[in-house]
Amino acid sequence: MNRSSLLRVLADVQTGALTPEAASDALAHLPFEDAGFATIDHHRSLRSGMPEVIFASGKTAEQTSEIFLRLARTGVNVLATRVDVAAYMLIQKHSPAAVFHELSGAVTLEQGNVQVPAGKVTVICAGTSDLPIAEEAAVTATLFGAQVDRINDVGVAGIHRLLAHRERIAAADAIVVCAGMEGALPSVVGGMVAVPVVAVPTSVGYGASFAGAAALLGMLNSCSPNVTVVNIDNGFGAGYAASTINLNIHNYLQ
């Protein structure tokens, strides 16, 4: 349940459209719900403006689908990341409208409780191998209310590809940049814009890239002061942070 849906419940009680008993049923699982194997935080939206998100890696298909179902029952938009096909098939049995984003491994359920998208988050990736992480960021930002512009395969090895999109990049309210190898792209983008850049090091590269550690260190040492860094392959965290920035700019998280 988010702030808007809670206010609707309270308003319906005030006008008599909803009985206090029915409102009590709607609020029965707040602030959290104990599922035995998980404690589901239904107050997350009220505190932070966005619902709890399911990290499916390490969970069984049954656990993932059960958490997804319980979140969906409260009316929030639901996001699960790093979902395999078996878990998605179980989710779809209970939530036929859930969408599997195969490239990123994310599953989303939109239930109409996010305002009309405003502002823009631009998601840039250095190479095609970075696309799964970039798409995780893009799916996250989209579900949480941002217009998302994707710019793919514009790494520094062919910098003219990036410069061809200068106008699109300049139009963003927040930017996510995903890159592996030496992780140079976020610094370049940071030097082009006057908005926050969230850098995502990816585990793409040859041996001395150390599964993304080289890109992580390069991004942490960026000389562009508007660049901040999330963990290796954390497209979700970058998309979440960028959409939070965007929503605050447009006064959606009030």
Image (spheres, grey):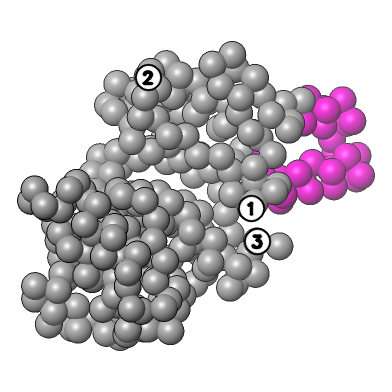
In the image, 228 versus 208, the foreground residue is 208
Residue count near mark 3 (Cα–Cα under 10 Å), binned few <14, some 14–19, many ≥20: some
Whether tag 1 and tag 3 are in contact, CB under 8 A, the answer is yes
Instruction: Check disc 3 and report its element: helix, strand or loop.
Output: loop
Indicate the quadrant where residue 5 lies.
Answer: top right
Residue count near mark 2 (Cα–Cα under 10 Å), binned few <14, some 14–19, many ≥20: some
From the image, tell me which residue sits under label 1. Answer: 49
Q: Residue sitting at 19 percent across and 46 percent down?
A: 211
Q: Amino acid at mark 3?
A: Leu
Alpha-carbon span between mark 1 and mark 3: 6 Å
Counting residues from the N terminus, which is met first, the one under dot 1 or under dot 3? 1
Residue 10 is inside the magenta segment: yes
Residue count near mark 1 (Cα–Cα under 10 Å), binned few <14, some 14–19, many ≥20: some
Instruction: Check disc 2 and report its element: helix, strand or loop.
Output: helix
Q: Amino acid at mark 2?
A: Ala
Position of residue 10 relative to residue 198, above or below, is above
Q: Amino acid at mark 1?
A: Gly
Instruction: Check disc 1 and report its element: helix, strand or loop.
Output: loop
Magenta stretch: give its range: 1-27
Q: Residue sitting at 37 percent across and 24 percent down?
A: 58
Counting residues from the N terminus, which is met first, the one under dot 2 or under dot 1? 1
Image coordinates of residue 67 in percent, x first then y, are 52, 25
Q: Residue sitting at 30 percent across and 48 percent down?
A: 233
From the image, tell me which residue sits under label 3. Answer: 253
Image coordinates of residue 147 in percent, x first then y, are 43, 65
Whether tag 3 and tag 2 are in contact, CB under 8 A, the answer is no
For the C terminus, the image quarter is bottom right
Q: Residue sitting at 58 percent across and 43 percent down?
A: 51
Image coordinates of residue 251 in percent, x first then y, are 65, 69
Indicate the quadrant where residue 186 lies.
Answer: bottom left
Alpha-carbon span between mark 2 and mark 1: 27 Å
The label number, if any, that marks residue 61 in the structure image: 2
